[in-house]
Image (cartoon, rainbow, N blue to C red):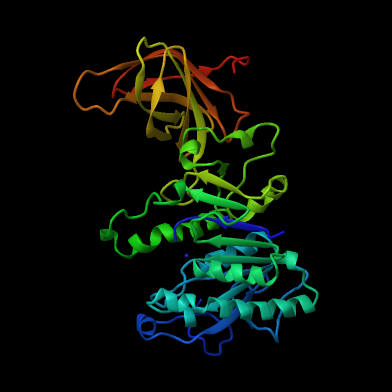
Amino acid sequence: MLKLYLFISLMCLVRSDTDETCPSFTRLSFHSAVIGTGLNVKLMLYTRKNLTCAQAVNSTALGNLNVTKKTAFIVHGFRPTGSPPVWIGDLVEGLLFVEDMNVVVVDWNRGATTVIYNHAASKTKKVAVVLKEFIDQMLAKGASLDNIYMIGVSLGAHISGFVGEMYDGQLGRITALGYREPLGNIDFYPNGGLDQPGCPKTIFGGLQYFKCDHQRSVYLYLSSLRENCTITAYPCDSYQDYRNGKCVSCLTPQKESCPLLGYYADHWEDYLKDKDPPMTKAFFDTAEEKPFCMYHYFVDILTWNKNIRRGDITIKLRDKAGSTTESKINHEPATFQKYHQVSLLARFNQDLDKVAAISLMFSTGSIVGPKYKLRILRMKLRSLAHPERPQLCRYDLVLTENVETVFQPILCPKLQM
């Protein structure tokens, strides 16, 4: 079965390619992109024994590649300026940090460097043929297809898919960073898969406006290798359902866990074996900056207003040290009815272990007119990431619209659901 783990997003050492003691990624110029370049594929091998100095390899010389270990191929994509991808060194280092493996950087910058995307795309199958010839030699030396891992960015994802097709879907794993439609066993959609927080919203953001969203998938993958955070995703039919807290069934005791973004996504493979077809979409939100982690809580609110209230909730948490974190639950107005509990999914960019104070603010979004009040019988805060933590409650609160109300929570009764 094709084991394809697709990361949907937004997207994608260093000198010339002359003979060097330590081969480095081909550096070209915008001039090269304008006049075009002929295809030339360089393969550079990194292992834990040569972390900083690559070894040139090819289909007739595997070098120090250990065929008994996993081999990860890093395949870049379209390069309209000719510059080396800034993330390649971090990705090599991160992969070798988490596992003792072979890492092969596939440098096809002479071919990918052009201002015309279709010219680069037309060369992807030729790159795939070069990689197949190399993998065939690995197999002849005793390697296993199960140990082949392709990591492709942008057009590199297409190349990885072509290689997988050449082996009838028997490669161990493919991670594709740079495609929107669902194709893989797991398709991850950060922030819904469109605009990413922290990226420029207008063309006045310069070059980052064109590449930041698309490139974010690479940095999200990198966060799973070295950053001190684990990004949890939630299997769901839509981003709206996820934001509305309807997709947390993977946290129930009957299931081991929710899928993790990045390198450890394949740990969820056993769950997928029970699905037909073995595919799922998973959604999650991220912070604006590294390491991008968000921490999820449910805010359960039971109200006793006579009339229905509709509006947004802003919640802030503070610990004893004074650290604060805030979540605005405003993607769509919540409907508060008398004696009806509303469970709101709050996302914070910090995980405060011991919450000393909580503040709530209610808003209808109206600028003119009277200020409404939200009368709360009970508020309950519960962590999704750490369900073992005590749930925090507060009773008999009255929120005046657009006024922040601060209070100290108490432990909820243990028998309370």
Residue 361 is situated, as x and y percent measured from the top left of the image, at 35, 25
Q: Quadrant of the C terminus?
A: top right
At a point 56% along the width and 46% down the height, the residue shown is 282
Asked if residue 70 shows in the view, the reply is no
Residue 324 is situated, as x and y percent measured from the top left of the image, at 41, 34
- Residue 244 vertical placement versus 263 (above, below): above
| Residue at the far front in the pictured view | 276
At a point 56% along the width and 87% down the height, the residue shown is 20
Q: Is residue 58 left or right of residue 247?
A: right
Of residues 253 and 393, the one drawn nearer to the viewer in this rendering: 253
Q: Is residue 29 left or right of residue 235?
A: left
At a point 76% along the width and 73% down the height, the residue shown is 67
Count of number-bearing discs: 0
Q: Is residue 37 left or right of residue 363?
A: right
For residue 144, which quarter of the picture?
bottom right
Of residues 204 and 16, the one drawn nearer to the viewer in this rendering: 204
Q: Is residue 283 left or right of residue 58?
A: left
Residue 218 is situated, as x and y percent measured from the top left of the image, at 50, 60
Q: Quadrant of the N terminus?
A: bottom right
- Residue 118 vertical placement versus 330 (above, below): below
Asked if residue 127 shows in the view, the reply is yes
| Residue at the far left in the pictured view | 368
| Residue at the far right in the pictured view | 142
Residue 406 is situated, as x and y percent measured from the top left of the image, at 37, 21
- Residue 190 vertical placement versus 405 (above, below): below
For residue 372, which quarter of the picture?
top left
